[in-house]
Amino acid sequence: MPNIVNKHATYEAVAPHLRNSIIDRINAGWRPRDNKGNITPKSLKTERWWDIGKTGHPKSTYPTRIYLLGNGTPLELHRKYNEEYPDDPMPYNQGEAKRLNKSQKHAFINYIRELIKQGIFRAL
């Protein structure tokens, strides 16, 4: 699978009205699909990350915090996140999470990847 997040690219958060429209579509069941109509990746269907109440849903705590950071490269956004929320720092990637004995699923790169797939963050 190709790498969705380009660590050198600058990403921007979409306007609030576009974010709300995207969230409405996700809540209505929209998911990315391959050319055969299957939800892709398959784990998105089985683990249901984007469902309401799950941490990957764009209105949950961490995606909302990241959205509010605005524009930047993934590293810049990660730095902004940890400066803005020093009481709840987040590791950048799975390797850093492992070194810190934190959940590898709770890595910044995972959240930004999902926000890009959802269309809430876009490359400039």
Image (cartoon, rainbow, N blue to C red):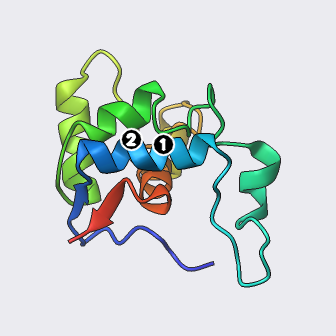
What residue is shown at x 63% (from left), y 65% (from top)? 32
Which residue type does callout 2 highlight?
Asn
Q: How many residues crowd mark 2 within 10 Å: few (<14), some (14–19), many (20+)?
A: some
Q: Residue 23 carries which label?
A: 1
Q: Residue 20 carries which label?
A: 2
Q: Which mark is residue 79?
A: none
Front residue (pair 101, 75): 75
Front residue (pair 26, 47): 26
48 relative to 107 in the view: left or right? right
Front residue (pair 12, 102): 12
Q: Position of residue 85 (x, y in %)?
A: 25, 23
* Furthest residue toward top: 87
What residue is shown at x 63% (from left), y 78% (from top)? 1
Q: Where is residue 18 in the image (x, y as percent from the top left)?
A: 32, 50
5 relative to 17 in the view: left or right? right
71 relative to 78 in the view: left or right? left
What residue is shown at x 62% (from left), y 25% (from top)? 53
Q: What element carries label 2?
A: helix
Q: How many residues crowd mark 1 within 10 Å: few (<14), some (14–19), many (20+)?
A: many
Q: Where is residue 44 in the image (x, y as percent from the top left)?
A: 71, 54
Residue 6 visible in the shown view: yes
108 relative to 65 in the view: left or right? right
Which residue type does callout 1 highlight?
Ile
Where is residue 73, by image quadrant?
Answer: bottom left
What residue is shown at x 53% (from left), y 36% (from top)? 106
Q: Where is residue 63 in the image (x, y as percent from the top left)?
A: 41, 37
CB under 8 Å between discs 1 and 2: yes
Q: What element carries label 1?
A: helix
Residue 90 visible in the shown view: no
Q: In which quarter of the image is the C terminus?
A: bottom left
